[in-house]
Image (spheres, rainbow, N blue to C red):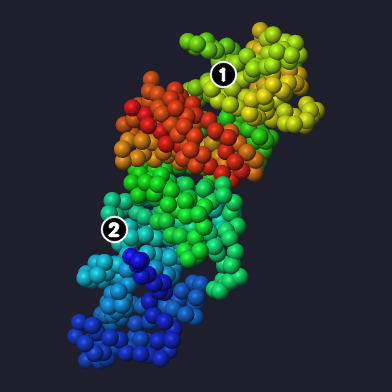
Amino acid sequence: MGLKFGIHIMRGLSTQAYDANTPILDTTKGGAYEESGRRWRAKDIGIKERSCAWMPHGFMSVNTKLGAGRAFLRSLYEQYAEWGVDFVKHDCVFGDDLDVDEITFVSEVLQKLDRPMLYSLSPGTSASPAIAKDISGLVNMYRVTGDDWDTWGDVAAHFDVARDFAAANKIGAKGLLGRSWPDLDMLPLGRLTDPGSNRGPYRMCNLNLDEQKTQMTLWAMVRSPLMFGGDVRKLDDTTYSLITNPFILEINSFSTNNKEACETMYFLEAFGILTDFFPDISSHCKCSFLMLLFLGLTSCNNPKVNGWVVESLDDLDQICWKENLRSHKPLCLYKRKPLLASDEQLIYNQGELHLLASDGMEFCLDASSRQKRTSKELKSSSFSPCRSDANQMWELNNNGSLISSYSGLCATVNSIDANVGNSGVRSWIATGRKGEIYVAVFNLNSVKTVISVKTSDMAKVLPGRNFNGTSCHGREVWSGKDFGKIEDLISMEVEVHGCALFVLNCP
């Protein structure tokens, strides 16, 4: 069937061999290893004080400075080659258990074998780019996280780790023993058992479909080895389509310049993402620049609301927040007369407008959720599918205030610098081998969020690319939606814990 044969092994020497003090094999001469007039045994090379952290009674390091220690390791891997092993997962030598000496010598042995054998390190607990620097070029892949299972918490925990390795320029490589292949662990999709259960009971993956798409997309953008962890014998159609998605495989195999790129994104966040929640915002974002803009509602007596102006374009107008924060382009909304039935026209004033996040986008600025709230409760505006509801009607006054016809409150814009925090939206960017651009946005929030990406900002992190005056053609992978020609902004409502993966072709 073309399948490869892989084994999982532990560090160095087993406690059983040490206690039995077994002789060491010399594969170069045959028989027991002899040096300096004596026969060497397990207790001569084992280092008991350097035992495996999570299996201290099982395995220990060997002294690779001794010829006998090197002979022992050589005999192991030559035996694996004789068995026809294609893949070795070497445990307890990385992260907390880092043993550069053993990794270095095993790598040398493997490269001298007649049989090619992939060399993988595990586990990745406490792995960091600094530790990975010591083993880059020695191994084919290395785990950078603890065990991943089918819970949202496990998936979400990978974002910060992936960001750090990308920031250290350790995403992807040319050739197997190249710069870096960080491994985010297996994809626990399809038919599974619970952790620690070898023979059932069996169940399907606990992640919902949106969460599974998020995991597949992040693993692809990080160029992590894709290791399927489910039961291949009972592979359902949905899982099969996820793990064989051609865009995912293309990005994972051939993309470059992969990085978390929040500095390239211009977010219009909604559905409960409030400035009042600043204390809960994560402090781990290390992007060089991002200004998150939050649309909010407040009393029209507040002088801070008088910041909206009309900007005329060739064939349509925008209403823009006049502040230009840190040289960022101002937040603009597209004006559109409400599309109302004839018998509804008398309900609304002539000056009332729909406000859209982008030209032609089907989401309108919404002053409320389903029911009317008090001004104290109504703290956040949002975008929702355009309707003929009063809560989507707005009026622009001469003093520059934007009034909600529904609540009588005025729209304002607040901001937070992502250098000191990060909301529940994450983004990655990469370039394809044919010049296409991949942009993935992830909604880690517990509410739906409309996320907008300004294509003109992408030049900040894509070397050699200039998007001024350039229009792109884009589509979204998971929905199959074709956005057609994109002038500068592409927007999409992203499900809870879901993602959107855009493929942009920009001349």
Quadrant location, the C terminus? top left
* Residue 160 left/right relative to 302: left
Within 10 Å of disc 2 (Cα), the crowding (few <14, some 14-19, many 20+) is some
Residue at 35% across, 44% down: 255
Nearer to the camera, 311 or 63: 311
**Of the image marks 2 and 1, the number of the one nearer the N terminus:** 2
Q: Is residue 431 visible?
A: yes
Residue sitting at the far left: 29
In which quadrant is the N terminus drawn?
A: bottom left
Residue at 24% x, 84% y is 26
In the orientation shown, which residue stands out farthest toward the right?
Answer: 374
Q: Residue 88's image quarter?
A: bottom left
Q: Which residue is mark 2?
A: 177
What type is the residue that disc 1 sits on? Tyr
Q: Position of residue 327 (x, y in %)?
A: 48, 23
Q: Residue at x 37, y 32 (%)?
A: 505
The residue under the point 68% across, 13% down is 352
SS for callout 1:
strand
Q: Is residue 450 above or below residue 193?
A: above
Residue type highlighted by circle 2: Leu
Q: Is residue 151 above or below residue 257?
A: below
Reading the image, the residue beneath label 1 is 334
